[in-house]
Image: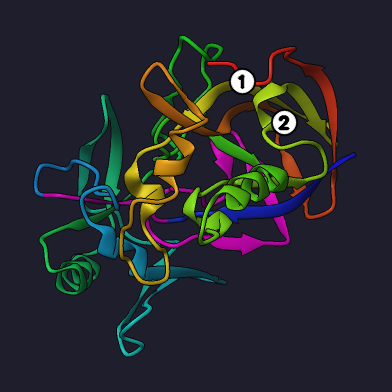
Amino acid sequence: MLKISGLFVYPIKSLGGISLNKAQVTSRGLEHDRRWMLVDEHNRFLSQREIPEMALLYVELTPNGLLVMHKKMPEEFISVPFLFDANEEAVCTIWDDECQAEFVDTEIDKWFSRVLKLKCRLVYMPKNSKRLVDQRYAGPGQITSFADAYPFLIVGDASLQDLNNRLQKPVPMDRFRPNIVFSGGEAFQEDQLAHFQIHELQFYGVKPCARCPVINIDQESGVSDKEPIKTLAGFRKKNNKIYFGQNLLHQGEGSISLGDEIIIKDLRSEKFIV
């Protein structure tokens, strides 16, 4: 039996994640997941790929918004409100996508620019901004947030254990930034999850997740190493890409919680599909 063992949201793209006991599934993915994003002077997204120090900023949910803090400088923190007056809008770029966003606050921009030592601004994705999922894999009208491409990423505990058994130094799940983690099943069983159900919500595995060197960044120190991507390349590489985890699309809205059963509706026969 497969059960949810972890739920995570990453309110500000590429900053620290938040572990939850219960999460609300919305049309874009989990509530609050990647609805905010830091952008450069050209309104292009920023991430740990170029700025590994972003890992040092962690986020907490408060009743009125987000609290962002610096892991190495506890005196540095900023509040980001859920409600604000959107006085300035922008078209922001994420990979090949462009979508509408709102600038949050100039004082917040100054704080991020100072602690990251580069000029940047914080944007928010409002309800009327509809960023479509890649139509080669999605149905008409399916949307996502500022995530790289899909509303959800799922990883099995057994997959991480299999990887860690091959590493000299184990890595935690936060390297891979999943939204849903499950217990039970075999290593890399997420590859085979073509369709599963949690309560009345339907989830569809549409594409294995190709990994970049961000997974080599220690999320506590912001320091990058050669692992685990070097080891993953030895047994999870295909067509010159390295895969870990499964991207998901979904139907329906509602809540999911730790311990909820994942009911498998359809499996792919192959164990590693790309």
Q: Are marks 2 and 1 in contact (CB under 8 Å)?
A: no
Closer-to-camera residue (31/172): 172
Q: Along the horizontal axis of the image, is 196 left or right of 67?
A: right
How did the renderer colour the structure? rainbow
Q: CA distance from mark 2 to mark 1?
A: 9 Å
Question: Is residue 17 part of the magenta span, yes or no?
Answer: yes
The kind of residue on which mark 1 rests is: Phe
- Rendering quarter of residue 94: top left
Question: Is residue 94 part of the magenta span, yes or no?
Answer: no
| Residue 210 screen position, x and y as percent | 44, 30
Residue corresponding to mark 2: 189
The kind of residue on which mark 2 rests is: Gln
- Rendering quarter of residue 76: bottom left
Element carrying mark 1 = loop
- Looking at the image, tell me whether mark 2 or mark 1 is earlier in sequence order: 2
Q: Residue at x 16, y 43 (%)?
A: 43
| Residue 109 screen position, x and y as percent | 20, 65
Residue 217 to residue 256: above or below = below
Q: Residue at x 46, y 42 (%)?
A: 231
Residue 64 visible (yes or no) = yes
| Residue 63 screen position, x and y as percent | 57, 72
Q: Residue at x 65, y 42 (%)?
A: 159
Numbered mark located on residue 245 in the image = none
- Which segment did they paint magenta? 12-40
Element carrying mark 2 = helix
Mark 2 crowd level (few <14, some 14–19, many ≥20, 10 Å Cα): many
Residue corresponding to mark 1: 272
